[in-house]
Amino acid sequence: MTYEILLALVTFAFVSSITPGPNNLMLMASGANFGFRRTVPHMLGIGLGFTVMVLLVGAGLVQVFDRFPISYTILKTASVLYLLFLAWKIAHAAQAKAGETSGTPMTFLQAAAFQWVNPKAWVMALTATTAYTPEQTLNAIVVVALVFGAVNLPSVSTWTVLGQQMARVLTNPKRLSVFNWTMAILLVASLYPVLWPT
C-alpha cells in the first residue's frame, strides 16, 4: 500500500467514523443517559466489532451476497427492524432517580454484533475494502482493518463525551425526553439511504 493510498484511507476512516450514523447517535444517547464510564464497553464493541467486520468482508464475505442476493434482502430487513427497536428503546429511556441508574447501556458483545446489521458499517466496510485494497491481499486488508480500529475509538469517544456533556443540560425530565426522542428520530432517519437508495 502506497503512502498516498494510506493517507486517503486514514482520511476516509476518520470522516466516515466521526460523521453521524447509528453507532454515533446511540453513543451520544448512551453518554447522556448512562455517562462515559458505563458506555466504554459499547465503544469498545463498536471498535473491535467493526475491525473484525472489515477483515471478514475483505476476506471474501461479500461474495456471499453476490452468490445469494436474497441474503442482502434478509440483512436489510433485519437492519431496519433492529434499528427501529433500538430507536424505540432510546425514545422510551426513563430518567434515572437520584443515586440510581435506569436501564442498561449496550454491552460489548451487543455493540460488536450490531455492526452486522448497521447499514452505515456495511457501506464503510465495502467501500474501504474495495477502494483502498487494489491488490486485494490479506496484508492490505489487515492494514485497512487496523487503520479503522485505530481511528474509530477516538471518533466514537467524541460522541460519548458529547452526550455526557449534554447530560448536564438534560437534568429536567422533559428535556431528557425531548433529547431521547430526537435521537430516536435521527436514528430512524439514518435508515433513509437503506430504504430509498439513490
Image (cartoon, rainbow, N blue to C red):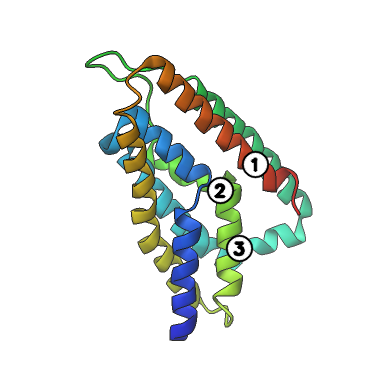
SS class, disc 2: helix
Residue located beneath label 1 in the image: 191
Vertical placement of residue 26 versus 61, above or below: above
Residue at (70%, 39%) from the top-left corner?
Answer: 77
The label on residue 89 is: none
Q: Amino acid at mark 3?
A: Leu
Q: Which mark is residue 116?
A: 2
Residue at image point 60% right, 42% down? 190
Helix, strand or loop for disc 1: loop
In the rendered image of this protein, does residue 43 appear above or below residue 34? below
Query: Where on the picture, by quarter, is residue 87?
Result: top right
Nearer the observer, disc 2 or disc 1?
Answer: 1
**Residue 171 drawn at (x, y percent):** 32, 20
**Which quadrant would residue 29 be assigned to in this image?**
top left
Comes first in the chain, label 2 or label 1: 2
Q: Is residue 124 above or below residue 58?
A: above
Q: Earlier in the sequence, mark 1 or mark 3?
A: 3
> Residue at (40%, 54%) from the top-left corner?
48
Q: Is residue 160 left or right of 2 when viewed as pictured?
A: left
Q: Which residue is mark 3?
A: 126
* Residue 14 in picture, x, y percent from top left: 44, 62
Looking at numbered disc 2 in the image, what kind of residue is underneath it? Answer: Trp
Q: Is residue 139 visible?
A: no
101 or 31: which is nearer to us?
Answer: 31
User: Splitting the image into 4 quarters, where does residue 163 fall?
Assistant: top left
